[in-house]
Amino acid sequence: MSILQKGRTTRYWWWIAFAGTATLPWIALRFSGWHGEPLAVAAVSGLAILGAAFLLSWAAEVAQMDISQSLALAFLALISILPEYAVDMVFAWKAGKELALPLAQQQGYAGLAAANMTGANRLLIGLGWSAVVLIYWARSRHRSVTIEPGQSTEMTFLALATLWSFTIPLRGEIGMLDLVVLLGLFVVYMWRASTAEHEEPELTGPPLALSVLPRLTRRLVTVGFFVWAALVILASAEPFAEGLVATGKHLGIEEFLLVQWLAPLASEAPEFIVASLFALRGNPSMGLGTLISSKVNQWTLLVAMLPLVFSFGAGHPVGMALDARQVEEVFLTSAQSLFALAVVLNFEMSMWEAGALIGLFITQLFFTQPEIRYAYAIAYVVLTVVIILRDPSRVSNLIHLVRTGGRR
């Protein structure tokens, strides 16, 4: 490395040091047995998640020197949503265990598992996707974000998972069939991402500092960042979510709503932060791509794991039955996913499209009546039809993506 390169990159190592240091206080407190007030726990563990998110975003960019962008984003998304998996799997396990209990003694964990899953998925699109476009607009005044061709793999499998998801409310359960189909989609998605074309990334900031390291050192450091960030997120997510939920309960908020919205907001924080960092640094396409990949992960692997963990808890293979409220929530989540897919099928998201996503998401939070929730779901479907009628090429793009396995 030349003297000029050293001068350009030295200051970036301070950024890396600050991000790494931010993860240490919570790790030290967690393993020392410290038990503080819920709000204090949420604050310190949240700082650790923020530091881990920085490390993840930098590692994902540098990883593109050795693997495809799709695979780098898939790994980034999978690590970022580890907290969501941890929370939802706990609910699914407890739901399976309580099947052996009399109905009067059951705590309704199946409903909480479904609430957490649907809430996380709708937050990801309604808040996350929109935020990337809005943050980029605030930074650059650009009124749209272009999705790179390399992210067509994610869009293909999001389409397949979304179409399948509509069968869940029709069957009234998340069962073994969903495990087979959705787990299969996830495996093929990861395989397809690993075979995507590799393009040399344009790096700035801390990723540039990492990129000039000797190849073996760079790869070891990149893997180390991924591993350390994953460990920090796993150690921080549950206390962060519990701290926020406990604070919410203290304020008198209903448990179902806490599990559906506040807990996912806490557990989704790493990926939201990562995507926002990309947008702030002028790379909104990768930020949006991260969240699209996260949606694919959650809409395939997360949903597939629910009946598996539920069955382990129950001690035998069994589907997780959905009641009327859960059927309504899954249908609404599927409809939102369909609309979001239609929005990005032209490989772009505009300000008005981001506004529609966040507007529909926020306003639905004020209504709990089933008929209004179904009205929102129908509105998503109608808007999907309107978008396609205005631009039929989006359907052509979808058919092409499915036929070619994600090649644009």
Image (cartoon, rainbow, N blue to C red):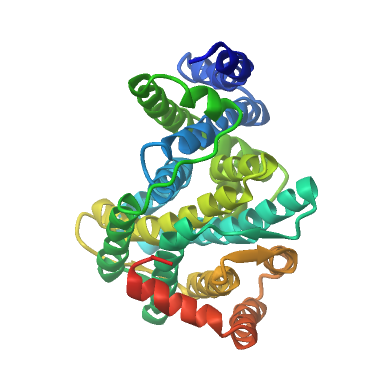
Please say whether residue 111 is visible from this viewpoint: no
For residue 364, above or below residue 269: below
Q: Residue at x 77, y 48 (%)?
A: 140
Q: Which quadrant would residue 311 be assigned to in this image? A: bottom left
Return the residue found at the far top.
Answer: 3
Q: Residue at x 63, y 39 (%)?
A: 277
Q: Which quadrant would residue 251 be assigned to in this image? A: top right
Please say whether residue 211 is visible from this viewpoint: yes
- Give the image location of residue 192, x and y in percent: 31, 57
Return the residue found at the far left.
Answer: 316
- Give the image location of residue 170, x and y in percent: 40, 82
Q: Residue at x 56, y 52 (%)?
A: 259
- Give the image location of residue 196, x and y in percent: 35, 54
For residue 345, above or below residue 281: below
Is 88 in front, or is 314?
88
Q: Which quadrant would residue 181 be assigned to in this image? A: bottom left
- Give the image location of residue 332, x and y in percent: 56, 73
Q: How many marks?
A: 0
Of the 4 image quadrants, the one containing the C terminus is bottom left
Is 135 in front, or is 283?
283
Q: Residue at x 53, y 74 (%)?
A: 338
